[in-house]
Amino acid sequence: MWFRVLLGSVLWAALGASWPGGVQAREEAPPAYREVIDRALQEHAAARFEEAYVLLKQAHEIWPNAGSARALGMTCYELLHFVEAGRWFEQALALERRRLTGARRAEVIDLMARARADTARVQLQLSPPDAEVWLEGRRVLPSARGEISLDPGEYRVEFRSDGHLSQGQRLILGAGESREIELALSPITSVSGVVASPEQVALEALEGGPSGLEVPVKSGSETAARPIHRRWWVWTAVGVVAAVATTALLVMSDQGEVSGANPNSNLTIETLSESGSAP
């Protein structure tokens, strides 16, 4: 609750009001900025924080200043978006327009520390080192130390690299939790032991695959490789094709016999078959 009360005062400060411990605006905000801020205040008062965030961001784009950045950081914190809240607080401290000083600056420094403390962190040790990290279908770039920062929650993370089998994991992270992931992706290989390129794998898959291509399969806790010609579905497909071809040949043969019958005979094939007579 105290965050909501404090955020309301921050938004009024962004409009240019004078608050104890604050700083008077050095320049007047444009009318478009004031209009959007008013709407943001109304949304926030109605506890529609997502809508308030959207409007605050619009106002900040119109007239970037430390007050609006501070308000955005506090709104993100209230929505438990700690990673983004930390970025907005950092920006609020850096902006010169309506620069924060005194108690307000100290307050933002404290809030930024809280947001970072509540941020979950995942330390990655991947092989190959340049493997891509995809989070909920979106690629993310780890820091130079191989770390990614996330809000608390549940995530589906996938690791990809050319010439390797992709692997996925489900992560459930709490506020301030730290996790380490050490993972080695398995290379895609052939019977000869040569690592197959992605283009080779795609081409072989389209052509039905060479007899020597290995398809990695899971066997218990170990990874095994089975040649393509030993896969049950290959021979099932071959059997289906052979059956279709045989049926087609029989139908064509029957049609040939019908077309060769005596045109002067008024007996049908069924009648001939029953009487045993010849045309």
Image (cartoon, rainbow, N blue to C red):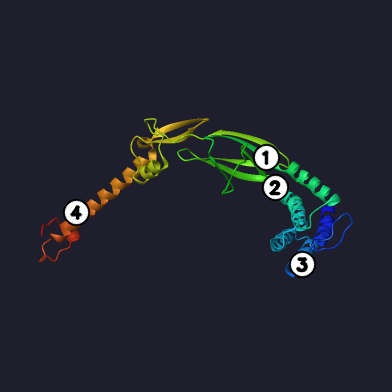
Mark 2 surroundings within 10 Å by alpha-carbon count, few (fewer than 14), some (14 through 19), many (20 or more): many
Q: Earlier in the sequence, mark 3 or mark 4?
A: 3
Residue matched to label 3: 34
Kind of residue sitting beneath label 3:
Arg
Residue matched to label 1: 121
Q: Earlier in the sequence, mark 3 or mark 1?
A: 3
Q: Earlier in the sequence, mark 4 or mark 2?
A: 2
Mark 4, secondary structure of its residue:
helix
Q: Position of residue 5 (x, y in %)?
A: 84, 57
Within the image, what quadrant is residue 196 found in?
top left
Kind of residue sitting beneath label 2:
Val
Residue matched to label 2: 83
Horizontal side of 96 relative to 161 (left or right) equals: right
Q: CA distance from mark 2 to mark 1?
A: 10 Å
Write the residue at 87% across / 61% down. 18
Residue matched to label 4: 253
Kind of residue sitting beneath label 1:
Arg
Q: Position of residue 154 (x, y in %)?
A: 65, 45
Kind of residue sitting beneath label 4:
Ser
Mark 3, secondary structure of its residue:
helix
Mark 1, secondary structure of its residue:
strand
Mark 1 surroundings within 10 Å by alpha-carbon count, few (fewer than 14), some (14 through 19), many (20 or more): many
Horizontal side of 85 relative to 160 (left or right) equals: right
Q: CA distance from mark 3 to mark 2?
A: 27 Å
Q: Position of residue 94 (x, y in %)?
A: 74, 51
Mark 4 surroundings within 10 Å by alpha-carbon count, few (fewer than 14), some (14 through 19), many (20 or more): few
Mark 3 surroundings within 10 Å by alpha-carbon count, few (fewer than 14), some (14 through 19), many (20 or more): some
